[in-house]
Image (tube, rainbow, N blue to C red):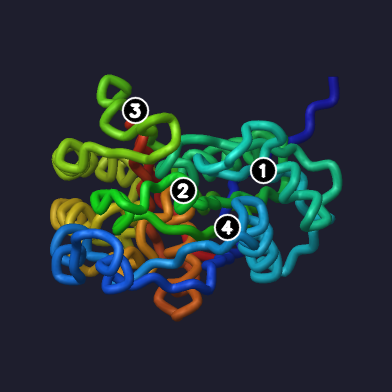
Amino acid sequence: MNIAPSAAGARIVGLGEYQPSNVVTNDDLAKRVDTSDEWIQTRVGIKERRIAGPEDTVVSMAVAAGGKALADAGLSPDDIDLVIVATCTLTEQIPNAAARVAARLGVTAPGAFDVNAACAGFSYALGLANDAIRSGSSRNALVIGSEKLSEWIDWDDRSTCVIFADGAGAAVVSAAETPGIGPVVWGSSGERAENIHLREGKYLYQEGQAVFRWATTELNKVAEEALRRAGVAPTDLHAFVPHQANLRIIESIARKLGAPQAIIARDIVTAGNTSSASIPLALARMAGRGELPSGSLVLVMGFGAGLSYSAQVLEIP
C-alpha cells in the first residue's frame, strides 16, 4: 500500500470576508420593536449590523469570502482539494453548500462538506482541515463560515432581532513545514441544548441569561486548555478573537484570560452576531486593518447552539 506522506503542519495562508451592503442601525430597529440604541448597546454591545438582501445567500456570501481568501493566499482554485463550509442557516439540507461553493469558485472535484456546530462551526471546521492536511488527505483547504441568520429571525422579537446578522468569512489552510494551527479543544454541553433552539421550527430563540451564565463561567477553562495544548502562555498572545456573541461575554472571558496585552476582537459592535462567520469575519477585518502582524499568535474560540464550543491557537500568515 502506497500511503501519501503526511504534512508536518498546517497553517492559515489567506483570509477573506464578505458583508452585505445593507446596514441596519439600532435606531432602525427601534422603529419596529420596543427597543432603543441605549438598550441594545448596554445589553449586547451592538451599534449596527449587516442584513442580507434577496441576492445574498449562504452560498453566494461564502463564494465572495472564499474568493477573497484565495486571492489573499495567492492560490488558484486548481490548488484547492478540500472545501468545508460551516453554517447553520441553509434553508435546504440537500445539496450541501460546500460543493456548490466549490463549483462557483472553479474548484474541480474537491472533497466538499458542511459542518453545523452553529457558532463554534468555523473553529470545528478549521480543526478538521488541520487534521486532514496533517494526515495527508488534503494539501490546500478552503474553510468558510457563512450565515444568513436574518431568514431565521422573528423581526418582532426584540430579544433576537437586535442581535443576529449576516455575513461570511474564509481562510485558506495549507500544508507547512511547521505547525501554525494548535490542537483544537472542542466539546459540548448537550444537556443545555434547548437553551438555543428554533421556536415553531422557524424562529431562532435563546435563553439569553442561561447562555450568558454558561459562557462567562465555563468557557475560560476551554481557552486555558487551548493555550496549554499549544504550549503558549497568555502573555504570548497578540490577539483574542472569540465568537462575536455579546460584547459583555467577550469582555468577561477576556478579563479571565490573563492577557492584558492582547487585542480583543470587538467586531460585534458593527457586524452583529453572525454565528459561524463571526470568527473568520473578525480575523479578516482585523488583518485588513493591519492589526495582526505576520507571525503573531491569536487565540480563537467559538461557542453557541448545541451547546458546542471549541478553541485553538493560530499563527497569522
Q: Is disc 1 surrounded by few (<14), some (14 to 19) or many (20+) residues within 10 Å?
A: many
In the picture provided, is 46 more to the left or to the right than 38?
right
Q: Position of residue 154 (x, y in %)?
A: 37, 47
In the foreground, 213 or 49: 49
Q: Which residue is mark 1?
A: 97
In the foreground, 3 or 215: 215
Q: Quadrant of the C terminus?
A: bottom right
Mark 2 falls on what kind of element? helix
Q: Earlier in the sequence, mark 3 or mark 4?
A: 4
Q: Position of residue 46 (x, y in %)?
A: 27, 66
Discs 4/1, front: 1
Q: Quadrant of the N terminus?
A: top right
Total residue callouts: 4
In the picture provided, is 287 more to the left or to the right than 54?
left
The mark found on residue 276 in the picture is 2
The mark found on residue 228 in the picture is none
Work out whether 14 lies above or below 130: below
Q: Which residue is mark 4?
A: 170
Query: Quarter-wise, where is residue 239 in the image?
Result: bottom left
Q: CA distance from mark 1 to mark 2?
A: 14 Å
Query: Quarter-wise, where is residue 71 in the image?
Result: bottom right
- Residue 242 visible in the current orientation: no
Q: CA distance from mark 3 to mark 1?
A: 24 Å
Q: Is disc 4 surrounded by few (<14), some (14 to 19) or many (20+) residues within 10 Å?
A: many
Q: Which residue is mark 3?
A: 188
Q: Earlier in the sequence, mark 3 or mark 1?
A: 1
- Residue type at mark 2 is Ser
Q: Earlier in the sequence, mark 4 or mark 2?
A: 4
Q: Earlier in the sequence, mark 4 or mark 1?
A: 1
Residue that sits furthest to the bottom in the current view:
289
